[in-house]
Amino acid sequence: MGEHAYHDWWGSPEPCPALYIELTRPNESVPFEIDLIAALDTGAPLTAVPWRLKDTANLHPVGRRWVEWAHYSGYEPTYMVRVAADEYFPQLVEILFHPYKQDYALIGRNLMRYWHVTLKGPQQILQITIPET
């Protein structure tokens, strides 16, 4: 089990539940991005990472998904990447590159489905446990 203090890094009026993640290409073992702050977004079906990483990632599209962002909607390519968060096992998940997020990622439900997440709002603590399989 891990407990993580909420973060207030992007000027939000309230701190939010977030973790540091690292991203690794599916067939590699060395991450191409480490210490990327990522907010939990229970409304996001997929994990989204900053657009600025698209060239560095050098990934090949695996599909397309309909997305709706501020002032934009349409089909966007998706990619597979291993996402590791703190001490939690890396998971191979489908991601999007988000054109409006440059400094942080969003952890979507496709990654959270591997965890039991508890938000302790009054204490501003994010608690994660890994369910037994």
Image (cartoon, rainbow, N blue to C red):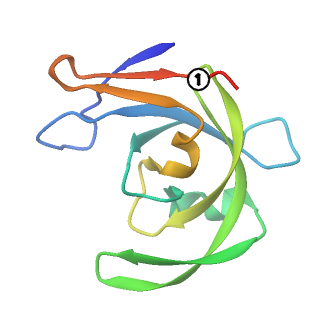
- Image coordinates of residue 45 in percent, x first then y, are 49, 59
Residue 95 vertical placement versus 82 (above, below) = below
As drawn, the residue found furthest toward the right would be 27
Left or right: residue 27 versus residue 65 is right
Residue at image point 70% right, 34% down: 90
Left or right: residue 114 versus residue 105 is right
Whether residue 34 is visible, yes or no, is no
Q: Residues within 10 Å of mark 1 (few under 14, many from 20)?
A: some
- What is the count of numbered marks? 1
- Image coordinates of residue 58 in percent, x first then y, are 76, 62
Q: Nearer the viewer, residue 129 or 79?
A: 129
Residue at image point 71% right, 75% down: 63
Q: Nearer the viewer, residue 116 or 125?
A: 116
Residue that label 1 marks = 130
As drawn, the residue found furthest toward the left would be 13
Whether residue 97 is visible, yes or no, is yes
- Image coordinates of residue 85 in percent, x first then y, are 57, 30
Left or right: residue 53 versus residue 44 is right
- Image coordinates of residue 55 in percent, x first then y, are 67, 64
Left or right: residue 126 versus residue 130 is left
Quarter of the image holding residue 79? Answer: bottom right
Residue at image point 36% right, 26% down: 118
Question: Secondary structure under badge 1?
Answer: loop
Residue 17 vertical placement versus 53 (above, below) = above
Name which residue type carries label 1: Ile
Residue at image point 48% right, 15% down: 2
Quadrant where the C terminus is found in the figure: top right
